[in-house]
């Protein structure tokens, strides 16, 4: 799964990478956790834009918002089958900008966190789904999202058996277009990232606590003896 990530690139990088003309200033964040609001690039009845969505997808048919805490990730292999994701996969896809994500490698009782990012420090877009849910008790609307995951690429397989789907920039438009309902054709996007330069580095276990923030969380620590 992908349970934490970082996004700290300036608005100019977002505008350039995702083609968003009016990209807002987004506060740099180094330890983004589920149930927080995250920046998402999407097309929703107009040009591509950035929205702040609750991380933890709440399907439109849900009776309670709490279900979102269990739906932070969606497995690429079953998007078209699961009721929680099927409709969003057809028409409500998004990209979650990231500079890197965290994953944990287990060694006995110890779980060592790694920060996984591109060596050239360029941001990227993780495939996501989004939904709009209306609270039956208050009539308030919540827009939420999840990250699509797949099997890992060779560069990071030693850390964990899943990774977020990283969409190549040349195919952003194809993924985001809500009129593109031919989901079977999108299947070749939902694969391990083989773009060059993706690397994992061990970082402090302070990232385990979502209350900890700051760029120091991304600093490399001594390589664990069991890492390959």
Image (spheres, rainbow, N blue to C red):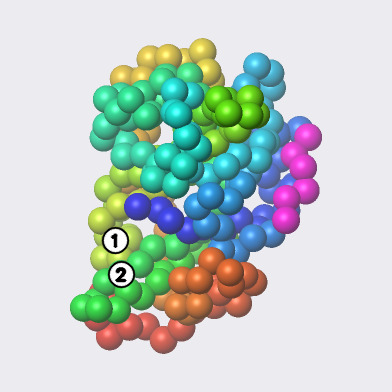
Looking at the image, residue 69 sits to the left or right of residue 42; the answer is left
Q: Residues within 10 Å of mark 2 (few under 14, many from 20)?
A: some
Residue 121 position within the rendered picture, expressed as x and y whole percent measured from the top left: 57, 61
* Residue 122 shows in this picture: no
Q: How many marks?
A: 2
Is 182 in front, or is 155? 182
Q: Residue at x 67, y 36 (%)?
A: 51
Is 213 in front, or is 36? 36
Q: Residue at x 25, y 56 (%)?
A: 161
Q: Quadrant of residue 45?
A: top right
In the image, the segment drawn in magenta is 22-27
- In this figure, which residue is indicated by the disc labeled 2? 105
Proximity of marks 1 and 2: CB atoms separated by less than 8 Å: yes
Is 25 contained in the magenta span?
yes
Q: Main secondary structure of the magenta part?
A: loop
Residue 160, label in figure:
1
Is 63 contained in the magenta span?
no
Residue 97 position within the rendered picture, expressed as x and y whole percent measured from the top left: 58, 46
Looking at the image, residue 13 sits to the left or right of residue 104; the answer is right
Is 138 in front, or is 91? 138
Q: Quadrant of residue 135?
A: top right
Q: Residue at x 51, y 13 (%)?
A: 179
- Alpha carbon separation for disc pair 1 and 2: 6 Å
């Amino acid at each position: 799964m992908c349970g934490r990530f970082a996004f700290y690139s300036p608005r100019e990088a977002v505008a350039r990478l995702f083609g968003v003309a009016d990209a807002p200033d987004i506060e740099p964040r180094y330890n983004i956790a589920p149930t927080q609001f995250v920046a998402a690039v999407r097309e929703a009845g107009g040009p591509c834009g950035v929205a702040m969505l609750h991380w933890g997808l709440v399907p439109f048919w849900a009776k309670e918002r709490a279900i979102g805490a269990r739906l932070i990730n969606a497995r690429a292999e079953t998007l078209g089958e699961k009721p929680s994701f099927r409709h969003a996969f057809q028409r409500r896809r998004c990209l979650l900008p990231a500079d890197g994500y965290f994953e944990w490698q287990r060694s006995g009782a110890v779980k060592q966190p790694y920060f996984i990012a591109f060596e050239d420090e360029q941001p990227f877009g993780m495939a996501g789904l989004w939904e709009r849910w209306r609270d039956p008790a208050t009539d308030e609307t919540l827009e939420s999202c999840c990250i699509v995951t797949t099997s890992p690429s060779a560069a990071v397989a030693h850390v964990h058996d899943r990774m977020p789907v990283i969409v190549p920039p040349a195919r952003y438009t194809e993924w985001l277009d809500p009129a593109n309902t031919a989901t079977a054709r999108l299947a070749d996007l939902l694969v391990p990232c083989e773009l060059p330069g993706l690397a994992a580095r061990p970082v402090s276990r302070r990232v385990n606590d979502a209350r900890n923030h700051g760029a120091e969380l991304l600093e490399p620590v001594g390589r664990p003896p069991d890492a390959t």
